[in-house]
Image (cartoon, grey):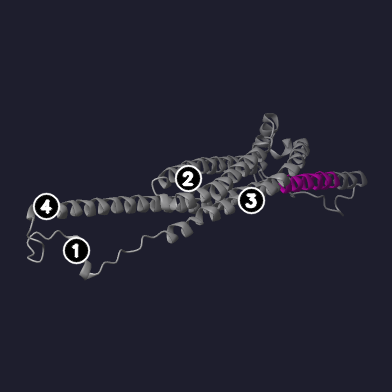
Amino acid sequence: MAFLAKVGAWVATNLPTFLKMTKGVAKFVHSAAEAGEALLEGRKIVGSDAPSPKKQSKSDTSDDRPDFVSSKKSQTDPVADLVVRVDESKKQLAKIERDNEIDHKRIALQIDIMELMISAQTFERFTNNINLHAANLQTHLYTIKNTAGLLDDVNRQRVAVKALMQTVNHMINVLNIEGEVQKISGIDINIRQGAISIADSYRAFEATRDLLVDEIDAYSTSIEDQLARADRVRQSARSAPSMSGTVSTWLERSVEPKLFAAKKAAEELRGDVTMIPRIEASLRRELLKSDFAPPEDI
């Protein structure tokens, strides 16, 4: 089982990389949490600029409408009076339309901000998945390490027991005491084919690493989407002067720096994961052979 020493060397080579990856995961989780908190700060903006209802007394209502028939109005020049009232009504209507347009833009901006805030929920899912895959990857590595060590110990003991059995039986034959001492026989000390499989553990290791890389890539894509959405919020804020400054400050000083930091941490973690070397093809073939070869050939 010379291949077990090669497996042990591969595991030992990867341990420093795994230590670095563990630190990278911790940094990634921290940066993702900060990005999520930065996005949720938008609640203050949405809540602080809620439009207040316009109060209007009943006594003012009559003045907001043109009065074409009231006898209280001056009858000296009814046409001129009518023109004045129509102009006033048009101005009031234009003001209402402007106010409605401003309210509409403000509400649209608030919706955009809330959509950006909702994206923070996806960060938690990505963080949980990446944490899980990284932990499983480390578990698979130590499973390979422990399995290789166990097989090596068992094989050494198996060889020793087989040599002891042969020596004892040989001495019984030489001393011609077979009738007095029973030979050692009927004891199976061979390893069962496939009972302990390093190849299966390694396949699980590779599959988990691929899942981890895919999840990191999906997270980076999500960060790009959030940055694009943040830019749309900035554009939308320009049409709502009362919120533009606050929104720009929030995006430029909190959201975007934290999103860029989170993306950088994800890229660094991906680099650490992809740096883990694969087991060489020749050694993988030996691992497969160890699963299916007859025990005496191992």
Q: CA distance from mark 1 to mark 4?
A: 18 Å
Q: Secondary structure at mark 2?
A: helix
Task: Specify the segment rendered in magenta.
Answer: 145-165
Return the residue at label 1: 63
Specify the farthest residue to the top.
Answer: 282
Q: CA distance from mark 4 to mark 3?
A: 84 Å
Q: Is residue 164 magenta?
A: yes
Q: Secondary structure at mark 1?
A: helix
Return the residue at label 2: 230
Could you say which is closer to the camera, residue 132 or residue 12? Answer: 132
Return the residue at label 3: 135
- Counting residues from the start of the chain, the first of labels 2 and 4 encountered is 4
Could you say which is closer to the camera, residue 245 or residue 160? Answer: 245
Left/right placement of residue 120 relative to residue 187 reads: left
The mark lying in front, picked from 1 and 3, is: 1
Could you say which is closer to the camera, residue 294 or residue 58? Answer: 58
Do tag 2 and tag 1 residues touch (Cβ < 8 Å)? no
Which image quadrant is residue 163 in? top right
